[in-house]
Image (cartoon, helix red, strand yellow):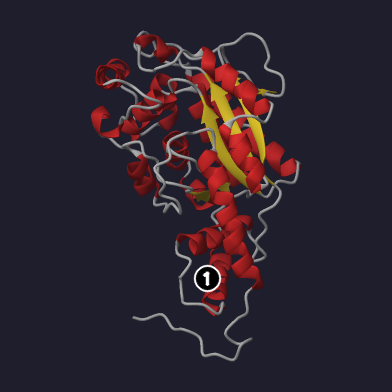
Amino acid sequence: MTLREAIGMIKPIDQAIRRQAKQHWDQVAKPLESLGVLEEDIIRIAAASGSLAVSLHPRAIVVMCGDNGVVKEGVTQTGQEVTAIVAGNMAQGNSCVCLMARQAGADVIPVDVGMACHEAVPGVVDRKVAYGTKDFLEEPAMTREETVKAMEAGVNMASELRKRGYVLAGSGEMGIGNTTTSSAILSVLLDMDPELVTGRGAGLTTAGYSRKVQVIREGIRIHKPSGEDPVDALSKVGGLDLAALTGFYIGCAACGIPVVLDGLITGAAALAAVRICPDVKGYLLASHVSAEPAGALVLEALELKPAISAGMCLGEGTGAAALFPLLDMAAAVYTQMSSFDDIHVEAYEHLV
């Protein structure tokens, strides 16, 4: 499926189902809206899937993996060889997200869209577009063609999920240096100074953090990525993992699959997807608010409320894995609890 075809398939979420799901919650024998964001999440899942009968299984977390040339500028604590090591651990079921997802009843699917390693990593889905991006201080991170190809890899992973019967998706990433690229993208899309949207990532000294901000600011100055054209921004200062995630969100919307974000990096990709096609927003759910400085900013821009505020900033899709059990609990109340009519109690009313 091409990017253009996927965008053409996206329909607005079903507003009638959304209203009915809200009405159903209001009839459940408990105080109105007392499960907070979890109620809204179930409503969003119903509207996105087009069914009042909310189904949360089977589900999978897709993790886009890619390397970033900007690592050579000293913006990270570790080298890019770590990307392939962690991806390999994911394939073996030993990474953080895998251990959490196992408890949450979700599969984890790591996807290589741009790792720098030349050998295939066993168990990692091969959708490689390039062997990492370029250093965006020297040249654009990618060509526009590479960016679209990575986005289409994401689109087609969503299509594959649908073919395999998955009804709910989570999203994650693995790519050393991708807090730098995601902060650059957010600086462009939110039209904010890099310092306001940049954190220390997986751990930087004060000098390293200052260098990171400087690199982002200089890359934006050199290439002048367009805030009105997310594909242009992704190609100039983004990453292959970010581009693939952007396409994945577009693909999930095209396939009618609700999809859970993780933290800052997935949020940056989701914002790019929504800027490309605003109807994508209805298919997105926030899991947690990242401890990264721009974590709350990107969710505010997406108009999404997170269910979890736990100071998380691990990545890999761990936020989605953490949210899944909470969704299960909320869905159990939504589908199984008695109504006010069942117990012959007058229903609560919304106060004006």
Percent x, y for residue 35?
A: 48, 66
User: Residue shown at 25%/21% (left/top)?
Assistant: 206
Q: How many labels does the image show?
A: 1
* Residue for badge 1: 22
Does residue 341 show up? yes
Q: Is mark 1 on a helix, strand or loop?
A: helix
Return the residue nearer the eye: 337 or 149. 337
Vertical position of residue 336 compared to residue 262: above or below:
below
Q: Is residue 215 left or right of residue 236?
A: left
Vertical position of residue 239 compared to residue 326: above or below:
above
Q: Is residue 330 left or right of residue 291?
A: right
- Three-letter residue code for mark 1: Lys
Quadrant assignment for the C terminus: bottom left
Mark 1, other Cα within 10 Å: few <14 / some 14–19 / many ≥20? some
Q: In which quarter of the image is residue 102?
A: top right
Quadrant assignment for the N terminus: top right
Does residue 1 show up? no
Percent x, y for residue 309?
A: 40, 49
Q: Is residue 262 left or right of residue 194?
A: right
User: Residue shown at 44%/12% (left/top)?
Assistant: 69
Q: Name the residue furthest right.
A: 164
Percent x, y for residue 221?
A: 26, 18
Q: In this view, does 27 lie to the left or right of 134?
A: right
Percent x, y for residue 104?
A: 63, 47
Vertical position of residue 128 compared to residue 261: above or below:
above
Return the residue nearer the eye: 125 or 78. 78
User: Residue shown at 50%/60% (left/top)?
Assistant: 38
